[in-house]
Amino acid sequence: AQTVTQSQPEMSVQEAETVTLSCTYDTSESDYYLFWYKQPPSRQMILVIRQEAYKQQNATENRFSVNFQKAAKSFSLKISDSQLGDAAMYFCAYARREKLTFGTGTRLTIIP
Amino acid sequence: EPEVTQTPSHQVTQMGQEVILRCVPISNHLYFYWYRQILGQKVEFLVSFYNNEISEKSEIFDDQFSVERPDGSNFTLKIRSTKLEDSAMYFCASSESFDNEQFFGPGTRLTVL
């Protein structure tokens, strides 16, 4: 079974600084997708960024980028120029066909 | 921008009662999902639904759960006899295909007393 591990239950960063959230996963598949979702206090799940496993190029989305290391099964999220609105729970997720498997999340606090 | 909607936003029920959670997926999406999140825990997959049938379900999705697409727009999750441990946030999601982004609704908070 696929598992997703987020080893940092909580992280904090100064506003305007850069922070990296870690995620590792376990799978025997070669074709899959990885995602980072953000869950603010409203508890809505919002997609931050997506990475296809067959793509070697790391995905970027404005201030958000990933470091995808397929051999190491690592998928970290870098947030540049952190803003107060980035404060949320961040979940890493693995998808093989329909099912999303989530990690336990990292609570990110932004320090003004 | 199209979005997934869910009703009600909060449902309170007595243990043993039946509840139906409703979702309206994005109109051109073909795949529908239910997830749940017990307070303070991770989001867990319950079931996926395609072409009017369940395509995958988790071990959580036992006989007390069922899903239905009663018409062209709604997608429902029924819990036949609720238990205290069913208290959670239930998220509906939809996607165009199985390998596309899943768009999540705002969730229904279910409280079982």
Image (cartoon, coloured by chain):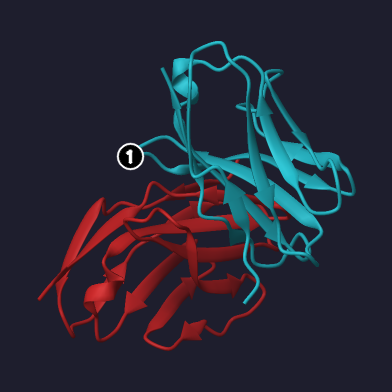
Chain colours: A red, B cyan
Occupied quadrant, residue A18: bottom left
Q: Residue at x 76, y 59 (%)?
A: B98
Question: Hey, which residue is sitting farthest right in the picture?
Answer: B51
Residue B97 image offset from top left, x and y in percent: 78, 63
* Left or right of A9, for residue A105: right
Residue beneath disc 1 = B40
Question: Hey, which residue is sitting farthest top in the picture?
Answer: B16
Residue A2 image offset from top left, x and y in percent: 58, 45
Q: Chain of mark 1?
A: B
Residue B52 image offset from top left, x and y in percent: 88, 44
At mark 1, the secondary structure is loop
Q: Say few, some or many: other residues with alpha carbon within 10 Å of mark 1 (under 14 / 14 to 19 / 20 or more).
A: few
Q: Residue at x 38, y 46 (%)?
A: A104
Q: Amino acid at mark 1?
A: Gly
* Left or right of B44, for residue A24: left
**Picture mark count:** 1
Can you say whether B86 is above or below A2 in the image?
above
Question: Hey, which residue is sitting farthest left in the picture?
Answer: A112
Q: Is residue A72 visible?
A: no
Q: Which of these two is toward me, B16 or A78?
A: B16
Q: Residue at x 54, y 68 (%)?
A: A70
Residue B28 image offset from top left, x and y in percent: 80, 67
Q: Which of these two is toward me, B97 or A25?
A: B97
Can you say whether A79 is above or below B11 in the image?
below
Q: Is residue B25 visible?
A: yes
Quarter placement of the N terminus of chain B? bottom right
Occupied quadrant, residue A34: bottom right
Quarter placement of the C terminus of chain B? top left
Q: Residue at x 40, y 81 (%)?
A: A64
